[in-house]
Image (tube, rainbow, N blue to C red):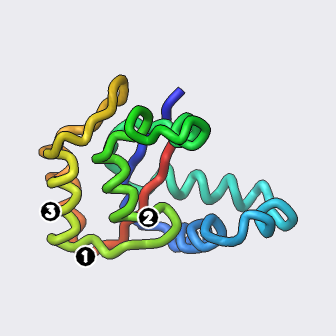
Amino acid sequence: MSADLHIHIRKAELITSALLFQDSDMMQQITNPLPMELRDRLFTAMSDDPNVHVGEVSWLKAALSEDTDTYVPSAVETINALIPPTRLTLLTKELIDAVVAALEGNGRAPGYAVSGAGPVEIFLREHVGEEVYTVSW
């Protein structure tokens, strides 16, 4: 089973809280989780933010097998490093160029689809100067 990595454009102020919580200590998340109502609002806000599909990935299989080459396309890994899921990143022309370069490269993994650079670039160029984050759904 794989997840889909998306680049989201932050529109909702609530997203900042979600990213800060996601970046917090794992034990803190277990012992003091967000209330269910707030989590539902966060997921709704994230899904409502404009976003573009980047590619498929299996973070869990990669972690369990210690084999990222098979389960994490290098394009997805590069983009996830450029735009970490735990913080907001300013979308610049240079960042878009780096994302496009990752997608145009040979960043594939067997059985995992990666989006074409063209549609991703068009989407991102419409949002230069805005804050972005990634989500694996």
In screen coordinates, is 101 left or right of 108?
left
Tell me if label 2 and label 3 are in contact, CB under 8 Å.
no
Question: Residue 115: x percent and y percent?
Answer: 25, 38
Report the front residue among 36 and 66: 66
Tell me if label 2 and label 1 are in contact, CB under 8 Å.
no
What residue did someone put label 2 on?
84
Query: Mark 3 packing: few (<14 Cα in 10 Å), some, or many (20+)?
Result: some
The correct choice, above or below, for 73 with respect to 88 in the image is above
Q: Residue furthest front?
A: 66
The correct choice, above or below, for 58 with respect to 47 in the image is above
Question: Residue 27: x percent and y percent?
Answer: 80, 65
> Who's the residue at 62% across and 64% down the image?
22
What residue did someone put label 3 on?
97
Q: CA distance from mark 2 to mark 1?
A: 17 Å
> Who's the residue at 37% across and 66% down the image?
132
Helix, strand or loop at label 2? It is: loop
